[in-house]
Amino acid sequence: MTHRLALLGATALSLLPFGAFAQPKELVLYCSVNEEWCRAQSEAFMRETGINVLMTRKSSGETYAQIKAEEGQPRGDVWWGGTGDPHLQAAQEDLTEAYESPVLAELQPWARAQAETSGFKTVGVYAGALGFGYNSTMVTENPPACWADLLDERYADDIQVANPNSSGTAYTMLATMVQLMGEDEAFAYLAKLHANINQYTKSGSAPIRAAATGESAIGIVFMHDAVAETVSGAPIVTVAPCEGTGYEVGSMSLIKGGPNPEAAKIWYDWALSPAAQEIGATAKSYQVPSNSSAATPPEAPKLADIKLIDYDFAKYGSSETRAALLARWDAEIGALPK
């Protein structure tokens, strides 16, 4: 145990309410990052605090749906990771608790803005830009550099992207296209792209794993997921689309009425600390951490070098907007024949 982590664990435990003589014994964690990172984070927390973590890994959309289904009788304590839009929707629908962590002052402006937008019912834990990756052994000439290039007929049935109902990554793509092009133009683009899609996956990172193995030529994902495949030795080239792109503020929320509220706050403060945020890189997760003092992995795509849109998290994380866009996607894209 490092000295810094030991201090963090002691600090977290000192945040127990006055009169709480017994250390919490259990935490139920809903995790929406990749499985390896979920495990590494849970195990580190258990080592530091002695609190047993019961972890379930699901994608952002699936986790939101589970929390919604459990409203009034929640089984989970913390929702950690996953795109910020469904976290904001959960906040709006009063599924999560307001909490102002003492670590907030250490966070990047975009992470604090996420907290302020939600009335402190969620907070940013990392950021990552949307893009795509292609298999360089399959795409050898005139590789795609822009969103428009993905409509090329040579990619027929050779692109994967997730379903925005289950995947926060894919919802970010949907919201990005609407903000880049306007809603009608975005759906026209997605209808054309459909001809080149061989599968709408459940998981947001699955498309780049398919490209890494040669199952598809291209996967539309967050750029850090494409980088992870390259670092692992796959022939994947990561692309920041020329027109501009959206990004995620991966978030964390306390589930309202969860069974272990003291343990939940201990996790919340710990997960915002520099040492806890640096665990991601050890699990081949190359997002930009939200704590200003946390080391950014050198492999992480540099947000300053990417043409990012001014993503409207409040609007596209609202219940009304998300429900309307997903319903239109189901009617106009998901219902198209293959």
Image (cartoon, helix red, strand yellow):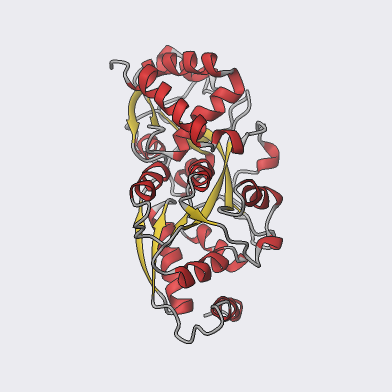
Image position, residue 54 (x, y; %): 34, 66
Of residues 305 and 51, which is closer to you in this image?
51
Q: Residue furthest front?
A: 72
Which percent across, then down, holds residue 26?
A: 38, 73
Residue at the bottom extreme of this rendering: 21
Tally of marks = 0
Q: Nearer the viewer, residue 254 or 46?
A: 254
Quadrant location of residue 276?
bottom right
Above or below residue 332? Residue 65 is: below
The residue nearer to you, when weighing 262 against 208, is 262
Quarter where residue 309 is shown: top right
| Residue drawn at the location 39% of the way across and 35% of the way down | 207
* Residue 209, position as x, y percentages in the image: 38, 40
- Determine whether, in the image, residue 258 is placed left or right of residue 19: left
Question: Can residue 132 be spotted in the picture?
Answer: no
Nearer to us in this view, 141 or 152: 152
Is residue 269 something one can see in this rendering? Answer: yes
The residue sitting at 54% across, 18% down in the picture is: 183
- Work out whether 90 lies above or below 172: below
Q: Is residue 6 above or below residue 138?
A: below
**Residue at left offset 46%, top offset 64%:** 41
The quarter in which the C terminus is drawn is top left
The image position of residue 21, as x and y in percent, is 48, 87
